[in-house]
Amino acid sequence: GVAGMAVTDSEALAALHRVFGYETFRGEQEAVVDHVIAGGDAVVLMPTGGGKSLCYQIPALVRPGTGVVVSPLIALMQDQVDALRALGVRAGFMNSTQDFDERRTVEAEFLAGELDLLYLAPERLRLAGSLDLLSRGKISVFAIDEAHCVSQWGHDFRPDYLTLSVLGERWPDVPRIALTATATDTTHREITERLGMPDARHFVASFDRPNIQYRIVPKADPRKQLLAFLREEHAGDAGIVYCLSRNSVEKTAEFLSKNGVEAVPYHAGLDAGTRQAHQARFLREEGLVVVATIAFGMGIDKPDVRFVAHLDLPKSVEGYYQETGRAGRDGLPSTAWMAYGLNDVIQQRKLIQSGEGDEAFRRRAGRHLDSMLALCETVRCRRGQLLAYFGQEPSGENCGNCDTCLAPPETWDGTVAAQKVLSTVVRLQRERGQKFGAVQIVDILLGRRTAKVIQFDHDQLSVFGIGEELSEAQWRGVIRQLLAQGLLAVEGDYGTLVLTEASGSVLRREREVPLRKEPEKPASVKGTGSR
Ligand code: ADP
Ligand code: ZN
């Protein structure tokens, strides 16, 4: 009844004040908390830093019994539990890092009703013993954190998450709350279906992160560009630099250290001790830079990360959003900076083609990449494009805090340039039965008699030297944009260029090809357009 709600309300607010010392709930928190305390299921989509934890911690404190939190972040459980205990919350965890005695202690506390919160690794729930244990205690709420791990299409997929539907079957009366910072419709649907939560109420917070400035610059000499960016805008700041490979993680960390930026590497090839030490330093110190593969970051709660830099292209917009979302959780101005170039496109396309997975998987991965490329190549507001990807309305045409809003890129009519590139590809294939990569195509266009051009007699082609009006960097930009627009494709392990179905319309002059103008010398400075 109405009176009952009021009591619940004040209990939740009292717990917020008493335990966490916060004045008020943020955004959707209050609605979520009320709904779950009243016994309803909930799917909560909130950006990183939005305050998901309280959405299940408060119900766990208010409802009788123990709140069981399923989380894949085993490495963080000890810290999470310690932090809660420091606030006076009776919390414990169970995962593979514990010895027998530690686990027995937690089990006993749970059975005696002495725990407010119990964190569990998902693989525990595969064990009959764990389910039996849970049956013998009293559970207030199930929280499924990082719920997007149930999605086979995401890069965080955990097979153990597929077994979590058992919770609803065995405990139909215990409310469940699934939480994630990943928000596309597909992921959303998968969470609801696979966790078996058809009646859950959905709470979707705005995904806008207004304090993050989004910038994507053309890649020339990425490490130098990064260094300039750090020196000019983020000297002494903590931040994360993402690279695709372990090797480039190592090299970049070394390069930064040599150049006076304190940086440490983090990737799955380092031993657990080193990884943990680097992570701990990052959390503790003020101005450390972590250079990492995407293995780093999930669940890391460091409020003052001032920048996230990408030296390689993320595989999807979701990945980009998650990774950049680790910047500026404290709400202060932060930068999401990325260097992006032709090789990124070729490399990612090759990865998809030669990678594992069936045809459907490849198609899907290709679509994800296309959306990411569209974000890179857009001449419109990047924030608007990001929000639109997540199905949300931007608040205006221009956000005023991304590079394309700060310095609107110019476009030019690239139709003739596109025809020249495509003709060269056609000539090689039709006249010679050959396929080549971007480097050779550009050398031919520029009329360069390189060893490889001579070797293949490519100076005899009618297209040899027809592109002297543009520079090498500009031609690479043209090819990159043609790849991004689907007017050119990459084939095989060597990244050779081939035509697509859409190429014909350009060659037949049936369509125009507007292209984004490339800066002569890629700028690493703030996008103010003053050059
Ligand atoms: P998420 O899990 O969504 O990334 P967290 O739950 O870790 O976010 O919360 C992010 C930060 O915001 C934490 O430092 C948390 O203490 C703080 N926070 C969350 N809710 C509130 C609130 N209602 N008032 C003040 N601070 C809050
Ligand atoms: Zn903008």
Image (tube, grey):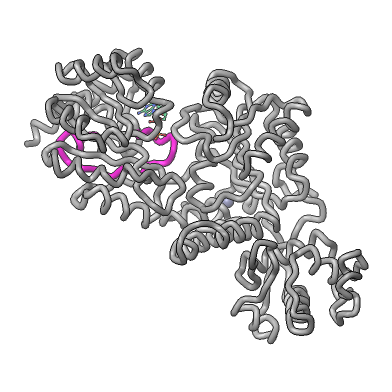
Task: Pick the residue in front: 10 or 490.
Answer: 490
- Tell me: residue 388, above or below residue 200: below
Question: Residue at point 26% right, 53% down?
Answer: 193
Task: Pick the residue in front: 81 or 273.
Answer: 273
Question: Residue at point 55% right, 35% down?
Answer: 268
Image-based side of 321 in relation to 58, left or right: right
Q: Which residues are magenta?
A: 33-52
Q: Considering the image in quadrants, where does the N terminus appear?
A: top left
Estimate the x, y position of residue 383 in percent, counting from the top left. Answer: 53, 51
In this view of the protein, can residue 469 be seen by the observer? no
- Tell me: residue 475, above or below residue 80: below
- Residue 48 falls within the magenta-colored stretch: yes
Estimate the x, y position of residue 376 in percent, counting from the top left. Answer: 61, 56
In this view of the protein, can residue 213 be seen by the observer? yes
Q: Quadrant of residue 353?
A: bottom right
Question: Residue at point 53% right, 21% down?
Answer: 280
Image-based side of 46 in relation to 107, left or right: right
Estimate the x, y position of residue 285 in percent, counting from the top left. Answer: 58, 19
Image-based side of 173 in relation to 486, left or right: left
- Residue 407 falls within the magenta-colored stretch: no
Estimate the x, y position of residue 267 in percent, counting from the top left. Answer: 57, 34
